[in-house]
Amino acid sequence: MATDALEYQNIFVEELGCLNRGYFKLSKTNLMFKNMATGKVQTISVDDIDEIAWQKLANKMGIRLSLKNGLHHRFGGFKSAEVDKISSFCSSNWRKTLKKNDLAVKGWNYGDADIIGPNLVFNVDNKVAFEFPLTNVAKCDKNKAEASLEFHVNEDCPVQLTEMRFHIPQDIDATDDVDLAEEFCKAIRQFVEVESDKVQPLVMLPQILLATPRGRYDIKIYQHHLLFHGKTYDYKIPFKTITRMFLLPHKDGRRMFFVLHINPPIRQGQTRYPFLVLEFQKEEDIDVELALTEDQLSQQFKGKLDRKMSGFLYEIIAKLFRVLVNSKIIVPGNFIGTSGTPTVPCSYRQTSGYLYPLEKGFVFVHKPTLYIRFEEIDNVHFARSDVSTRSFDFEIVQKNGTSVLFGSVGKEEYNKLFDYAQAKGLKIRNATRIADKPSYKEDIFAGSDEELDPYKEGLKRDAAQRGREESESDSEDEDFDLDKEVKKRKEIAAEDSSEGSASEPDEEYSTGGSDVSDDIAQTAKKQAKKEAKKEKKEKKEKASSSKKGGDKEKKKKDPNAPKRPQTAYFIWFNENRNKIKKEGDSVSDTASRAGQMWKAMSDADKKVSLFKSINLRYRQASIRNHYRDQAFPYRPCSLIHTQLYYRDSVNSAVSEHPIW
């Protein structure tokens, strides 16, 4: 019985020199490969497959697919014993024969270089020695009888092939004078698409705003890559490095974000940008005309693109990228926030942005842009913010142990995010939902234009509840009169005792008297407790009032008294202020920079300023003592105190800075 599907793990695909591992699946209708690092799914339909072969890839076996459009795909990491299972699956489900390719292992460095579709295949003795897609080639130059190929650089690949040279001699028996090396380079340049005057882009989009990296760029769209030309930086991005695309609406409803996820990322200096965020005005229109004929469009893109297109700018760009990259564009799903848009305003680290809960993950735009897939998430946590009770923190803990914290999320978004996480099957650490809003009584005196403040209404409700409780306790105290109750019960006890024998003790026969005395005692105890509490409260109030009254008044500052001496830091700061201050700095910026410089200085550099500070302390102490002696002439001479103060200042400075 034939199997309906075959699944394999730890299968690798080579992309720009890197071996990317993932999951491999063969089904009746297609072939699927899911990258474990990026989560990108590559699907190849059975109808597009021209040939399938079994061959050696590195130190393990692999599958080589030849598509009808000329592209080659290779998947490695299979065990040798899987050949029979895969062969029977292909013959029974796909009606295709699994061929076995033998590779050239002679080690010769000469052979035939054939260009088959967008691939270069080097054959030795009619066997394949190596092959690579020409889209990996960045540049092709000719030097005499030599063709030099330079490849795109992948920053994530530690060891990579960057250049290859082919020596192509002239044919001695050839009658016509044809430069074979030049013809070879021309054939390769058809797929390289080097930017030149001869190669025209499909379309050019001028001055497109990018939120990340910030700036305006002229975008040239070719058949296999993009060119971003800015004032300072230029980027070339092959379409096959674009793993995902997102089209996200802004909260204000007037703008749109178009996000490109790139692997490997582009670089500006030491900064890497795995995401490009294009920002468009929603109402901006554009008319474009592609630099292709109708026949070329129908042959290459099967009628998916029109030669002339007009409409909103973000829609035109999304349509172009959808066809050229051959990948779906991810848009928000059913989640709608309180703003009426599929976004939640929040902050990540020190930057505010927007969180988009999607069907298979979360996207945060835009600085930095983050994409977190559900399969990477271990659990989520709804935490109360330490800053304000009107917001909370939303934490995502990933399976690799790292956590991403989104702060300043409005409290009104709590239930919506909670329901969303619950519906998607995410593990919630604190699985509690906030109760619905209480129904507030409408204030008939409030204006119709005034908005209802839940916080204010909650305070009103609590105050009214406390007032009711106090009024109930007061009414109970007013209804009960202790003196009247005692007098009444004494009269009842006297009547009961007069009915019995006067010579016998009342307690022996009259039970009513004992009950009355017990009740009176209990009531008296309660009243005594109340009075004790009242006295305690009065004593506390008296103590607090006496404490307030007994506080010493603040000493008034003498305006004529000498000022305190400056510290070593301020002496150094005043001397070097002009050197520290930069153009456009505020007072706080200058002070902050000075503090950092002072902190970084060594004790030897601070030595001069510290000695100046000590001398200034000595002089100021003498002046201050002289002023104090004039104000209080009967005090003893303060010269000794001044000397002691100077000695202590020096000793403390030496102890703090042992380098002296």
Image (cartoon, rainbow, N blue to C red):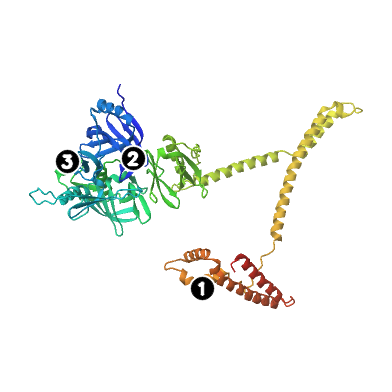
What residue sits right under mark 1 in the picture? Answer: 575
- On the image, the x and y values in percent for residue 125 come to 20, 39
Quadrant position of the N terminus in the picture? top left
* Relative height, residue 102 to residue 227 (above, below): above
Q: What amino acid does circle 1 point to?
A: Glu
Real-space Cα separation, disc 1 to disc 3, in angstroms: 76 Å
Relative placement, left or right, of 153 versus 615 is left
Q: Say what secondary structure mark 1 lies in.
A: helix
Q: Which residue is mark 2?
A: 40
Q: Are marks 2 and 1 in contact (CB under 8 Å)?
A: no
Compared with 201, 342 (above or below) is above
Camera-side residue: 482 or 15?
15
Mark 3 or 2 closer to N-term?
Answer: 2
Give the number of the disc on residue 299.
3
Question: Which secondary structure, mark 2?
Answer: loop
Disc 3 packing (10 Å; few <14; some 14–19; many ≥20): few
- In the rendered image, residue 161, in percent from the top left (x then y), is placed at 30, 48
